C-alpha cells in the first residue's frame, strides 16, 4: 500500500526475527571516505531530510547512512537514520539506529517515540510501553496516546488522550486518535460517537468497519504499518559499521571514489492490510519545534446576519446532550462566528444506541457554507446538511439577547 500521508517518523516493520545487530554487511564503497567529515555529514543529513519529505525511502536511507558514517557522534543524525529506516519499512534497523540515538541523547523524545513504534512492530509491546512511560513528558499527548494504544494498553491511552480531547486546541486528529483508542478498548458505541464529530454520516459506518478489521491484526506489525502508511519488509538490520559500539573504520575503507556504485538489493515487501484512515501520528521533525506563543483573546463578535433557509451546519454527534453542551461551550469559545447563534440538537438512532447531533442553522445554503468555513478556520469540523428534526437545544441559556437577524 502506498500513502502520501507518510511522516518524518516513518514506520512499518521488520519480519518477526531476532533483533540482534547481526546487520546487513556493509559494502566497502558505501561509506568510502578518508576520515570523518562533519561538513559532508551536514550535507548528507540535509539531503536525507529532503528525501524524507518527498517520501523517497531509498534515498533517505542512503543519505542518512552517509551522515552517520561521517559524524557518528551526532545523535540527531542517528535519529534521522532511524526515521529513514522506518520510512523504508525496516524496523530492525530503525530500532538499532534509534537506540544509538538515545544513547547519545537520552532527552530526545522524538527518538523515543520512533523507537517505541519500532518495538511495537517487532512484538516488544512491554518494551514499547516502558519507553513511552519514561519519555511521556517529551512526547505530544496525541502521539503518546495512540502509541500507547498500539503498544497494547488502550485504557492507559484513554487516560492520556481524554484531557487532550477536552483542551480548547484539540484537533480532529486528536479526536480521531481518541476514538480509535476507544475502539481498541472495546468501547465501540463511544468510539462511534466521537468519530462522528469529524466524519460525515454517510462515511461513519465504513469507518467503524475499517476499525473493526484494524482491531484484529494478523501480525505484530500490521497496526503500526497501517497507521503510518508504509509496507513492512524483511530486514537484517543496519550496516554493522554504523553501530555506535563499533564506529566505521574509515582508514580500512576503500578511499577510491565510486562514480556509480552497485545498489544494494532491496528486500521484498511483506503485504499488510488496508490501513485505518485518519488516525495518524503528528510529524516529528528532526529540528526542535519553536515554543508556542499565546494568542490574544478574540474581539467580541458582531451580530451574525444570515438569510433563513432549510440548511444547518452539523458540528458533531455525541453520546448525549451533556457531552454536546460541553462541546458547544468549547467550540463557541474558539469560533467567534458561533457565539451569536443558538445551538440546536436532535436525537437520532445509531444501531442499538442513540446519538445527539449538535448543529446551528435555519440558513440559506450560501450562509450555511460560510458558517462552516468559519468553524473549520477556527479549528473545528463541520458539514452542511438539510434540517432534520433540529431544534434549539433545551440546555441552551443565552448569555445576552444577541440573536440571528434575518435579512
Image (cartoon, rainbow, N blue to C red):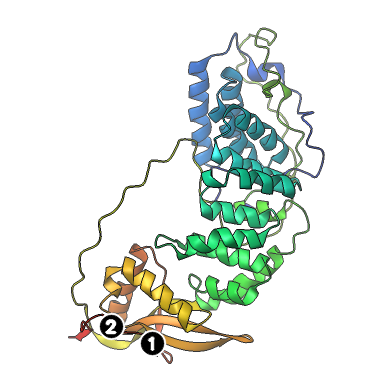
Query: Can residue 372 be seen in this snapshot?
Result: yes
Is 293 on the left or on the right of 24, as rendered? left
Observer-side mark, 1 or 2, equals: 2
Q: Compared to 238, does 54 lie above or below?
A: below
> Could you tell me which quadrant the C terminus lies in?
bottom left
Q: In the image shown, does 104 or 287 lie closer to the viewer?
A: 104
Is 308 on the left or on the right of 218, as rendered? left
Helix, strand or loop at label 2? It is: loop
Residue at figure coordinates x 50%, y 62% from the top left: 163
Is 356 on the left or on the right of 295, as rendered? right
What number is the disc on residue 393? Answer: 1
Q: Quadrant of residue 116?
A: top right
Is 227 on the left or on the right of 126, as rendered? left
Residue at figure coordinates x 38%, y 41% from the top left: 290
Residue at figure coordinates x 54%, y 42% from the top left: 8
Q: Compared to 59, does 223 lie above or below?
A: below
What number is the disc on residue 271? Answer: none
Q: Residues within 10 Å of mark 2 (few under 14, many from 20)?
A: few
Helix, strand or loop at label 1? It is: loop
Q: Quadrant of residue 189?
A: bottom right
Q: Earlier in the sequence, mark 1 or mark 2?
A: 1
Q: Position of residue 194 (x, y in %)?
A: 53, 72
Q: Position of residue 125 (x, y in %)?
A: 73, 49
Give me the C-alpha separation between circle 1 and circle 2: 11 Å
Q: Position of residue 203 (x, y in %)?
A: 55, 74
Q: In the image shown, does 351 or 251 lie closer to the viewer?
A: 351
Residue at figure coordinates x 58%, y 38% from the top left: 111
Query: Can residue 232 be seen in this snapshot?
Result: no
Q: Residues within 10 Å of mark 1 (few under 14, many from 20)?
A: some
Q: In the image shown, does 395 or 274 lie closer to the viewer?
A: 395
Q: Which residue matches tag 2? A: 398
Q: Compared to 341, does 220 lie above or below?
A: above
Amino acid at each position: 500500500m502506498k500513502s502520501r500521508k507518510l511522516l518524518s517518523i516513518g514506520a512499518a516493520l521488520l519480519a518477526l526475527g531476532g533483533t540482534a545487530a547481526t546487520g546487513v554487511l556493509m559494502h566497502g564503497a558505501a561509506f568510502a571516505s578518508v576520515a570523518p567529515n562533519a561538513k559532508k555529514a551536514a550535507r548528507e543529513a540535509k539531503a536525507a531530510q529532503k528525501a524524507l519529505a518527498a517520501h523517497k525511502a531509498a534515498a533517505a536511507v542512503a543519505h542518512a547512512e552517509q551522515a552517520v558514517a561521517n559524524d557518528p557522534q551526532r545523535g540527531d543524525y542517528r535519529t534521522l537514520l532511524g526515521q529513514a529506516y522506518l520510512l523504508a519499512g525496516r524496523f530492525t534497523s530503525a530500532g538499532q539506529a534509534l537506540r544509538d540515538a538515545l544513547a547519545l541523547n537520552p532527552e530526545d523524545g522524538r527518538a523515543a517515540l520512533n523507537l517505541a513504534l519500532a518495538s511495537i512492530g517487532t512484538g516488544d509491546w512491554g518494551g514499547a510501553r516502558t519507553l513511552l512511560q519514561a519519555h511521556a513528558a517529551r512526547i505530544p499527548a496525541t502521539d503518546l496516546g495512540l502509541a500507547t494504544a498500539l503498544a497494547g494498553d488502550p485504557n492507559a491511552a484513554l487516560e492520556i488522550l481524554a484531557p487532550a480531547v477536552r483542551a480548547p486546541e484539540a484537533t480532529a486528529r486528536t479526536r480521531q486518535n481518541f476514538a480509535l483508542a476507544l475502539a481498541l478498548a472495546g468501547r465501540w458505541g463511544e468510539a462511534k460517537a466521537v468519530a462522528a464529530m469529524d466524519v460525515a454520516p454517510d462515511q461513519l459506518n465504513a469507518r467503524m468497519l475499517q476499525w473493526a478489521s484494524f482491531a484484529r491484526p494478523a501480525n505484530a506489525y500490521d497496526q503500526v504499518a497501517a497507521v503510518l502508511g508504509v509496507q513492512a519488509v524483511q530486514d537484517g538490520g543496519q550496516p554493522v559499521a554504523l553501530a555506535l559500539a563499533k564506529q566505521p573504520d574509515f582508514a580500512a575503507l576503500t578511499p577510491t571514489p565510486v562514480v556509480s556504485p552497485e545498489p544494494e538489493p532491496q528486500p521484498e515487501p511483506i503485504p499488510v492490510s488496508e490501513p485505518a484512515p485518519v488516525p495518524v501520528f503528528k510529524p516529528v521533525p528532526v529540528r526542535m519545534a519553536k515554543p508556542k506563543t499565546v494568542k490574544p483573546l478574540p474581539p467580541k463578535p458582531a451580530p451574525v446576519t444570515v438569510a433563513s433557509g432549510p440548511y444547518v451546519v452539523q458540528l458533531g454527534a455525541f453520546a448525549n446532550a451533556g457531552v454536546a453542551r460541553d462541546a458547544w461551550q468549547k467550540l463557541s469559545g474558539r469560533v467567534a462566528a458561533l457565539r451569536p447563534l443558538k445551538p440546536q440538537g436532535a436525537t437520532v438512532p445509531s444501531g442499538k444506541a442513540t446519538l445527539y447531533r449538535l448543529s446551528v442553522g435555519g440558513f440559506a445554503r450560501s450562509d450555511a457554507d460560510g458558517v462552516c468555513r468559519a468553524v473549520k478556520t477556527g479549528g473545528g469540523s463541520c458539514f452542511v446538511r438539510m434540517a432534520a428534526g433540529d431544534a434549539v437545544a433545551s440546555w441552551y441559556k443565552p448569555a445576552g439577547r444577541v440573536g440571528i437577524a434575518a435579512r
